[in-house]
């Protein structure tokens, strides 16, 4: 008796080039945020306002958009 279970499953990776570019940009923004925090004085505008906004933008906006974006 022959077993005809030769079904192939086609898997397509959901992430394309645009996703990787957005993810790389998000990582870049996060690195810039940490560098901005490191290079500013303790109580400066740069360390208290700019760098947390860059980090929030990178972690909460750009990286999730890169992971959820489909076209």
Image: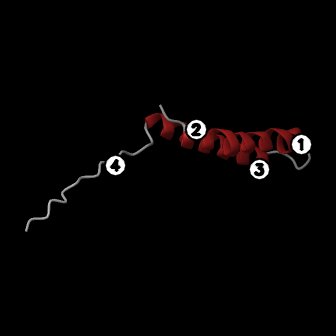
Q: Say whether marks 3 and 1 touch (CB < 8 Å).
A: no
Q: Say whether marks 4 and 3 touch (CB < 8 Å).
A: no
Q: Nearer the viewer, mark 4 or mark 3?
A: 4
Q: In which quadrant of the rendered image does the N terminus lie?
A: bottom left
Q: Callout 3: helix, strand or loop?
A: helix
Residue at 55% in and 37% down: 22
Sequence-wise, the earlier of marks 3 and 1 is 3
Q: Nearer the viewer, mark 2 or mark 4?
A: 4
Relative image position of residue 69 (x, y in whole percent)? 54, 36
Residue 2 lies left or right of residue 60; in this view the side is left
Residue at 78% in and 40% down: 53
Q: In the displayed structure, would residue 7 be above or below residue 47? A: below
Residue tagged by mark 3? 38
Q: Which of the labelled discs sits on residue 44, or is there none?
A: 1
Residue at 60% in and 38% down: 65
Residue tagged by mark 2? 25
Sequence-wise, the earlier of marks 4 and 3 is 4
Residue tagged by mark 4? 11
Sequence-wise, the earlier of marks 3 and 2 is 2
Q: Quadrant of residue 46?
A: top right
Numbered-mark total: 4
Q: Nearer the viewer, mark 3 or mark 2?
A: 2
- Residues packed near mark 3 inside 10 Å, few (<14), some (14 to 19) or many (20 plus): few
Relative image position of residue 45 (x, y in whole percent)? 88, 39
- Residues packed near mark 2 inside 10 Å, few (<14), some (14 to 19) or many (20 plus): some
Sequence-wise, the earlier of marks 1 and 2 is 2
- Residues packed near mark 1 inside 10 Å, few (<14), some (14 to 19) or many (20 plus): few
Sequence-wise, the earlier of marks 1 and 4 is 4
């Amino acid at each position: 008796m022959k077993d005809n279970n030769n079904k192939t499953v086609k898997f397509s990776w959901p992430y394309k080039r645009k996703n990787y570019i957005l993810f790389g940009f998000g990582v870049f923004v996060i690195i810039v945020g940490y560098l901005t925090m490191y290079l500013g004085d303790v109580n400066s505008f740069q360390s208290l306002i700019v760098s947390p906004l860059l980090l929030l933008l990178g972690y909460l906006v750009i990286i999730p958009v890169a992971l959820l974006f489909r076209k």
